C-alpha cells in the first residue's frame, strides 16, 4: 500500500492543483496535556475552548469530507488524554479521511491498540534528542518522559499494521541543535521519518497561540549561533540526499534558517506573501471553531460541526474571515503549513512529494524490541557525543 489510498490521492491532487479545497486540517482535540514543554504555549491558549463531544466530532468529520479534506492531524494538548480518542479516529477514517495522531509519546499500550483498531496507522511522536536527561528537561522537567516515549516507539513498531507509518516531530532549539542529526539517524535505523520545526517565540503583549513566551530563554537562538545553525541544516540536507528519512524540502529548510536568524521567510512569495489558509489548510479549536492556524483566531466563531459549515466554506465566508488575519502575519514555520504551500506552488517539491506519496509503505517500521531500540539510540548518541566533545561545542550558545 501507499501513504494515501486512491480516493485520498485524488482529493489531495485536486486540492494542490485547484487550491479550492483544503488538503489538511489540524484539529486540536484538547488543551489538556501531561507535560509542559518549554516551546509550547497551546495548552494555555486553548484552555478557554471546551472540547467537542463525539457527536459534534462526527458531524465535523462529515463536513470536512464534504469540502474535500484529505488528511487530519489530531493534536493537542495531548490527544491521548482523551478517553474517546479511538472513537474520534473512527469518525474521520469512516469518512475516508487519513488520520495522523500526534503525541508526546506517553500513550498506553491499551489505548494505542484501540486507536489502531479504529484505523489509526500514522503517528508522529515528539522527539528532540537521544539524551534522556535533555529530553526530560525540554518536556518541562518530567523525569523518565524520554524513556516512556521510547517505550511507545517500540510499541508502534511492534503493533502497527504492515502499512503503518511513523514520524518524529523534532523542535529545533539552541539546546538540541547538536542533537538533531542523532534523531535523524535513529529514525532511519528503525524505519521512522523526521520533520523539523524551529521553536516559535512571542511576547506577552502579543500572544500567539502556540508560541512560547520563552521566559527562561531556552528557545531563541542568539546571533552567535547562526553560522552553526546553517551548517547543521546543510548536514541534514546532505544526509537526506544520501537516503536518510528527512521529510523536509530544501525550500523549507532554507526558511528555517531565515526564521531563526530573524529574516523574512520566503515560502509564501508566490502567493503575495500570504499563506494558503484556509484554501489548503486550517485549524480547529477543541470546540470545533475554525481558525486560520494555531496562532490566531477568527474574529467570529465558525463551528465546523454546524450543518451550514460546508456552505460557509464554499461561499468564501471562511476565506474572507481568515484573510483579515493572515494578511498581517509575518509568517510561521509550523512544518505542515509551509510544506503544503511549497508542494502546491513549487515544481521540484511537488514532484518529490508525488514520488513520496506513491512509495510502498509496507514493512517500513523495523520489528525491533524495546531493548533493541534503546540500544540503537544509545549507540548513535554515544558515537555522536564523541564528535560533539571533539568539536568542543557547548550545548547552548552565549548571547
Image (cartoon, helix red, strand yellow):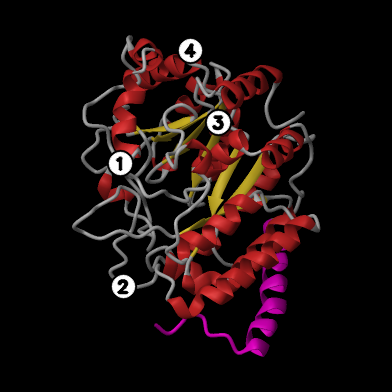
Q: Which is more foreground, mark 3 or mark 4?
A: 4
Magenta segment = 370-399
| Residue assigned mark 4 | 66
- Residue 296, numbered label: 1
User: Going from the N terminus, do you reach mark 1 or mark 2 first?
Assistant: 2
Badge 1: residue crowd in 10 Å (few <14, some 14–19, many ≥20): some
Q: Is residue 395 magenta?
A: yes
Q: Is residue 110 above or below residue 191?
A: above
Q: What is the spatial separation of the Cα atoms under label 3 and label 2, in whole angstroms?
A: 35 Å
Q: Which is more foreground, mark 4 or mark 1?
A: 1
Q: Is residue 240 above or below residue 335?
A: below
Outermost residue to the left: 205
Q: What is the spatial separation of the Cα atoms under label 3 and label 4, in whole angstroms?
A: 16 Å
Picture coordinates of residue 307 (x, y %)? Answer: 33, 9
Q: Secondary structure at mark 2?
A: loop
* In the foreground, 395 or 206: 206
User: In this view of the protein, can residue 284 be seen by the observer?
Assistant: yes
Q: Would you say 377 lies left or right of 222 here? A: right
- Residue 285, numbered label: none
| Residue assigned mark 2 | 216
Q: What is the quadrant of the C terminus in the image?
A: bottom left
* In the foreground, 292 or 136: 292
User: Going from the N terminus, do you reach mark 3 or mark 2 first?
Assistant: 3
Picture coordinates of residue 137 (x, y %)? Answer: 43, 70
Amino acid at each position: 500500500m501507499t501513504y494515501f489510498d486512491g480516493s485520498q490521492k485524488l482529493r489531495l491532487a485536486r486540492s494542490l492543483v485547484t487550491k479550492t479545497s483544503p488538503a489538511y486540517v489540524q484539529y486540536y482535540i484538547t488543551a489538556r496535556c501531561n507535560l509542559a514543554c518549554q516551546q509550547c504555549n497551546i495548552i494555555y491558549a486553548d484552555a478557554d475552548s471546551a472540547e467537542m463531544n463525539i457527536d459534534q466530532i462526527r458531524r465535523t468529520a462529515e463536513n470536512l469530507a464534504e469540502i474535500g479534506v484529505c488528511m487530519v492531524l489530531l493534536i493537542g494538548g495531548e490527544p491521548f488524554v482523551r478517553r474517546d480518542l479511538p472513537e474520534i479516529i473512527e469518525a474521520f477514517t469512516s469518512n475516508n479521511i487519513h488520520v495522523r495522531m500526534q503525541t508526546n509519546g506517553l500513550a498506553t499500550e491499551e489505548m494505542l491498540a484501540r486507536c489502531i483498531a479504529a484505523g489509526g496507522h500514522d503517528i508522529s511522536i515528539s522527539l528532540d534528542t537521544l539524551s534522556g536527561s535533555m529530553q526530560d528537561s525540554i518536556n518541562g522537567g518530567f523525569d523518565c518522559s524520554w524513556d516512556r516515549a521510547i517505550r511507545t516507539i517500540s510499541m508502534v513498531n511492534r503493533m502497527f499494521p504492515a502499512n503503518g507509518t511513523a514520524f518524529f516531530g523534532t523542535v529545533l532549539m539552541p539546546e538540541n541543535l547538536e542533537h538533531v542529526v542523532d534523531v535523524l539517524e535513529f529514525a532511519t535505523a528503525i524505519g521512522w521519518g523526521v520533520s523539523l520545526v524551529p521553536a516559535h517565540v512571542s511576547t506577552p503583549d502579543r500572544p500567539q497561540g502556540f508560541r512560547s513566551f520563552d521566559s527562561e530563554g531556552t528557545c531563541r537562538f542568539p546571533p552567535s549561533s547562526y553560522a552553526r545553525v546553517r551548517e547543521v541544516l546543510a548536514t541534514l540536507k546532505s544526509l537526506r540526499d544520501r537516503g536518510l528519512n528527512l521529510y523536509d524540502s530544501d525550500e523549507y529548510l532554507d526558511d528555517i534558517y531565515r526564521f531563526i536568524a530573524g529574516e523574512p521567510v520566503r515560502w509564501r512569495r508566490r502567493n503575495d506573501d500570504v499563506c494558503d489558509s484556509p484554501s489548503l489548510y486550517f485549524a480547529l479549536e477543541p470546540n470545533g471553531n475554525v481558525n486560520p492556524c494555531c496562532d490566531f483566531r477568527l474574529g467570529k466563531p465558525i463551528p465546523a460541526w454546524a450543518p451550514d459549515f460546508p456552505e460557509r466554506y464554499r461561499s468564501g465566508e471562511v476565506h474572507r474571515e481568515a484573510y483579515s488575519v493572515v494578511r498581517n502575519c509575518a509568517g510561521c514555520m509550523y512544518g505542515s503549513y509551509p510544506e503544503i504551500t511549497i508542494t502546491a506552488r513549487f515544481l521540484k517539491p511537488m514532484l518529490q512529494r508525488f514520488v513520496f506519496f506513491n512509495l510502498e509503505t509496507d514493512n517500513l517500521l523495523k520489528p525491533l524490541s524495546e531493548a533493541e531500540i534503546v540500544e540503537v539510540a544509545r549507540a548513535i548518541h554515544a558515537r555522536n557525543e564523541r564528535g560533539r566533545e571533539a568539536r568542543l561545542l557547548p550545548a547552548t550558545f552565549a548571547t
